[in-house]
Amino acid sequence: TDARHIARHGAESERAALAARPDTPPELLFFLGADRSPAVRARVAANRSTPPQADRVLARDEDVSVREVLARRIAALAPGLDPDTTDRLRRMAWETLCLLAEDAAEVVRAAIAETLADMPDAPRDLVLRLARDSAPPVAEPVIRLSPLLTDADLLALIVTPPAAFTRRAVAGRVNLGAALADELARSADDA
Protein backbone atom coordinates (compact mmCIF):
# COMPACT_ATOMS: atom_id res chain seq x y z
CA THR A 1 0.00 0.00 0.00
CA ASP A 2 0.97 3.67 -0.20
CA ALA A 3 1.40 3.93 3.56
CA ARG A 4 3.84 1.01 3.62
CA HIS A 5 5.79 2.53 0.75
CA ILE A 6 5.98 5.88 2.55
CA ALA A 7 7.07 4.21 5.80
CA ARG A 8 9.92 2.45 4.01
CA HIS A 9 10.94 4.85 1.26
CA GLY A 10 9.22 8.20 1.81
CA ALA A 11 10.92 11.49 2.57
CA GLU A 12 11.29 12.41 6.22
CA SER A 13 8.38 14.85 6.01
CA GLU A 14 6.14 12.14 4.51
CA ARG A 15 7.15 9.61 7.17
CA ALA A 16 6.54 12.19 9.91
CA ALA A 17 3.09 13.01 8.51
CA LEU A 18 2.26 9.29 8.39
CA ALA A 19 3.52 8.83 11.96
CA ALA A 20 1.22 11.61 13.17
CA ARG A 21 -1.98 10.28 11.57
CA PRO A 22 -4.44 8.67 14.00
CA ASP A 23 -5.52 6.14 11.35
CA THR A 24 -2.02 4.81 10.68
CA PRO A 25 -2.09 1.05 11.41
CA PRO A 26 -0.37 -0.01 14.66
CA GLU A 27 2.16 -2.18 12.82
CA LEU A 28 3.31 0.82 10.75
CA LEU A 29 3.55 2.97 13.87
CA PHE A 30 5.69 0.28 15.46
CA PHE A 31 7.88 0.24 12.34
CA LEU A 32 8.12 4.06 12.29
CA GLY A 33 9.03 4.00 15.99
CA ALA A 34 12.43 2.70 14.88
CA ASP A 35 12.86 5.31 12.11
CA ARG A 36 16.30 6.88 11.75
CA SER A 37 14.78 10.36 12.19
CA PRO A 38 14.10 11.63 15.73
CA ALA A 39 11.35 13.87 14.26
CA VAL A 40 9.51 10.83 12.92
CA ARG A 41 9.95 8.90 16.18
CA ALA A 42 8.67 11.93 18.14
CA ARG A 43 5.52 11.96 15.99
CA VAL A 44 5.03 8.27 16.76
CA ALA A 45 5.57 9.01 20.47
CA ALA A 46 2.88 11.71 20.36
CA ASN A 47 0.35 9.61 18.43
CA ARG A 48 -2.47 8.30 20.65
CA SER A 49 -2.86 5.33 18.30
CA THR A 50 0.67 4.08 18.91
CA PRO A 51 0.53 0.61 20.44
CA PRO A 52 2.00 0.02 23.93
CA GLN A 53 4.64 -2.29 22.44
CA ALA A 54 6.02 0.64 20.42
CA ASP A 55 5.79 2.91 23.47
CA ARG A 56 8.00 0.46 25.33
CA VAL A 57 10.67 0.75 22.62
CA LEU A 58 10.34 4.55 22.47
CA ALA A 59 10.80 4.80 26.26
CA ARG A 60 14.39 3.71 25.64
CA ASP A 61 14.95 5.97 22.62
CA GLU A 62 18.38 7.56 22.44
CA ASP A 63 16.84 10.99 21.75
CA VAL A 64 15.61 12.69 24.93
CA SER A 65 13.04 14.77 23.04
CA VAL A 66 11.33 11.58 21.84
CA ARG A 67 11.16 10.28 25.41
CA GLU A 68 9.84 13.64 26.64
CA VAL A 69 6.99 13.64 24.10
CA LEU A 70 6.16 10.06 25.04
CA ALA A 71 6.26 10.89 28.76
CA ARG A 72 3.65 13.64 28.32
CA ARG A 73 1.31 11.38 26.33
CA ILE A 74 1.61 8.37 28.64
CA ALA A 75 1.31 10.49 31.81
CA ALA A 76 -1.99 11.88 30.52
CA LEU A 77 -3.28 8.29 30.53
CA ALA A 78 -2.18 7.71 34.14
CA PRO A 79 -5.64 7.93 35.77
CA GLY A 80 -6.75 4.95 33.69
CA LEU A 81 -3.68 2.87 34.45
CA ASP A 82 -3.48 0.39 37.29
CA PRO A 83 -0.33 -1.47 38.30
CA ASP A 84 -2.42 -4.49 39.31
CA THR A 85 -4.46 -4.76 36.14
CA THR A 86 -4.75 -8.04 34.30
CA ASP A 87 -5.16 -6.21 30.99
CA ARG A 88 -1.85 -6.78 29.20
CA LEU A 89 -1.85 -3.54 27.21
CA ARG A 90 -2.73 -1.35 30.21
CA ARG A 91 -0.06 -3.12 32.22
CA MET A 92 2.49 -2.37 29.50
CA ALA A 93 1.45 1.30 29.50
CA TRP A 94 1.84 1.44 33.29
CA GLU A 95 5.28 -0.17 33.12
CA THR A 96 6.31 2.28 30.40
CA LEU A 97 5.18 5.21 32.54
CA CYS A 98 7.20 3.86 35.49
CA LEU A 99 10.23 3.41 33.26
CA LEU A 100 9.94 7.02 32.09
CA ALA A 101 9.53 8.23 35.69
CA GLU A 102 12.97 6.73 36.38
CA ASP A 103 14.55 8.25 33.25
CA ALA A 104 18.02 9.72 33.73
CA ALA A 105 16.97 12.84 31.83
CA GLU A 106 15.39 15.36 34.18
CA VAL A 107 13.27 16.81 31.36
CA VAL A 108 11.52 13.46 30.88
CA ARG A 109 10.66 13.10 34.57
CA ALA A 110 9.60 16.77 34.65
CA ALA A 111 7.20 16.18 31.74
CA ILE A 112 5.47 13.49 33.80
CA ALA A 113 5.42 15.67 36.93
CA GLU A 114 3.93 18.64 35.07
CA THR A 115 1.21 16.42 33.61
CA LEU A 116 0.34 14.72 36.91
CA ALA A 117 0.85 17.67 39.27
CA ASP A 118 -2.78 18.70 39.71
CA MET A 119 -4.53 15.47 38.69
CA PRO A 120 -6.80 14.28 41.49
CA ASP A 121 -6.89 10.76 40.06
CA ALA A 122 -3.19 10.29 39.27
CA PRO A 123 -1.50 7.19 40.69
CA ARG A 124 -0.60 8.15 44.27
CA ASP A 125 2.57 6.02 44.45
CA LEU A 126 3.91 7.69 41.35
CA VAL A 127 3.10 11.16 42.70
CA LEU A 128 4.96 10.33 45.94
CA ARG A 129 7.96 9.11 43.95
CA LEU A 130 8.03 12.33 41.92
CA ALA A 131 7.67 14.46 45.08
CA ARG A 132 10.84 12.86 46.44
CA ASP A 133 12.85 13.52 43.26
CA SER A 134 16.04 15.52 43.76
CA ALA A 135 15.46 17.72 40.70
CA PRO A 136 13.38 20.88 41.29
CA PRO A 137 11.55 20.78 37.92
CA VAL A 138 10.34 17.28 38.79
CA ALA A 139 9.41 17.54 42.46
CA GLU A 140 8.27 21.17 42.83
CA PRO A 141 5.12 21.04 40.65
CA VAL A 142 3.94 17.90 42.40
CA ILE A 143 4.74 19.16 45.91
CA ARG A 144 3.06 22.52 45.29
CA LEU A 145 -0.03 21.30 43.41
CA SER A 146 -0.89 17.66 43.96
CA PRO A 147 -4.17 17.12 45.80
CA LEU A 148 -3.00 13.58 46.53
CA LEU A 149 -0.30 14.61 48.99
CA THR A 150 -1.67 14.37 52.52
CA ASP A 151 -0.52 16.42 55.50
CA ALA A 152 1.41 13.33 56.62
CA ASP A 153 3.19 13.16 53.25
CA LEU A 154 4.04 16.86 53.41
CA LEU A 155 5.21 16.57 57.01
CA ALA A 156 7.57 13.76 55.99
CA LEU A 157 8.95 16.00 53.24
CA ILE A 158 9.52 18.80 55.76
CA VAL A 159 11.12 16.62 58.43
CA THR A 160 13.31 14.65 56.02
CA PRO A 161 13.61 16.71 52.85
CA PRO A 162 15.08 14.78 49.92
CA ALA A 163 16.61 18.00 48.52
CA ALA A 164 17.44 21.55 49.60
CA PHE A 165 14.42 23.04 47.78
CA THR A 166 11.82 20.64 49.23
CA ARG A 167 10.74 22.73 52.21
CA ARG A 168 10.43 25.82 50.02
CA ALA A 169 8.17 23.87 47.65
CA VAL A 170 5.97 22.74 50.54
CA ALA A 171 5.82 26.34 51.80
CA GLY A 172 4.55 27.35 48.35
CA ARG A 173 1.39 25.26 48.65
CA VAL A 174 -1.92 27.08 48.83
CA ASN A 175 -3.94 26.55 52.04
CA LEU A 176 -1.05 25.13 54.03
CA GLY A 177 -2.33 24.02 57.43
CA ALA A 178 -1.13 25.51 60.71
CA ALA A 179 0.66 22.33 61.83
CA LEU A 180 2.68 22.21 58.60
CA ALA A 181 3.43 25.94 58.76
CA ASP A 182 4.64 25.51 62.36
CA GLU A 183 6.88 22.61 61.32
CA LEU A 184 8.32 24.69 58.48
CA ALA A 185 9.04 27.52 60.93
CA ARG A 186 10.76 25.07 63.31
CA SER A 187 12.98 23.83 60.48
CA ALA A 188 14.97 27.10 60.58
CA ASP A 189 15.19 26.90 56.78
CA ASP A 190 15.49 30.58 55.84
CA ALA A 191 14.49 30.04 52.22
Image (cartoon, rainbow, N blue to C red):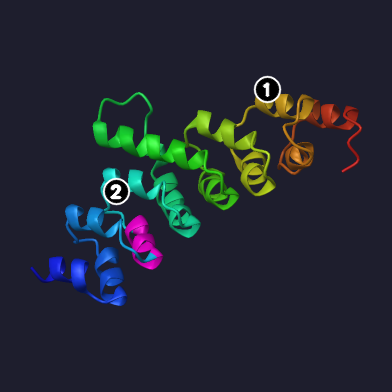
Labels 2 and 1: the sequence-earlier one:
2
Instruction: Please tell me whether mark 2 or mark 1 is closer to you in this view.
Output: 2
In this rendering, position of residue 38 left or right of residue 10: right
Q: From the viewer's side, name the closer residue of 150 and 178.
A: 150
Q: In this view, does 81 lie above or below 44?
A: above
Can you identify the residue that label 1 sits on?
152
Q: From the viewer's side, name the closer residue of 121 and 63.
A: 63
Residue 67 percent coordinates (x, y): 45, 52
The magenta segment is 38-46
Residue at the spot 22% in from the left edge and 74% down from the top edge: 10
Q: How crowded is mark 2: few (under 14 residues within 10 Å), some or many (20 or more)?
A: some
Amino acid found under the numbered disc labelled 2: Ala
Tag 2 near tag 1, CB within 8 Å: no
In this rendering, position of residue 105 left or right of residue 29: right
Which disc is residue 6 wearing? Answer: none
Q: Is residue 191 above or below residue 26?
A: above
Q: Is residue 35 above or below residue 27?
A: below
Magenta stretch holds residue 42: yes
Residue 12 percent coordinates (x, y): 31, 74
SS for tag 1? helix
Asked if one can make out residue 167 in the rendered structure from this viewpoint, the answer is yes
Residue at the extreme left of the image, as rendered: 1
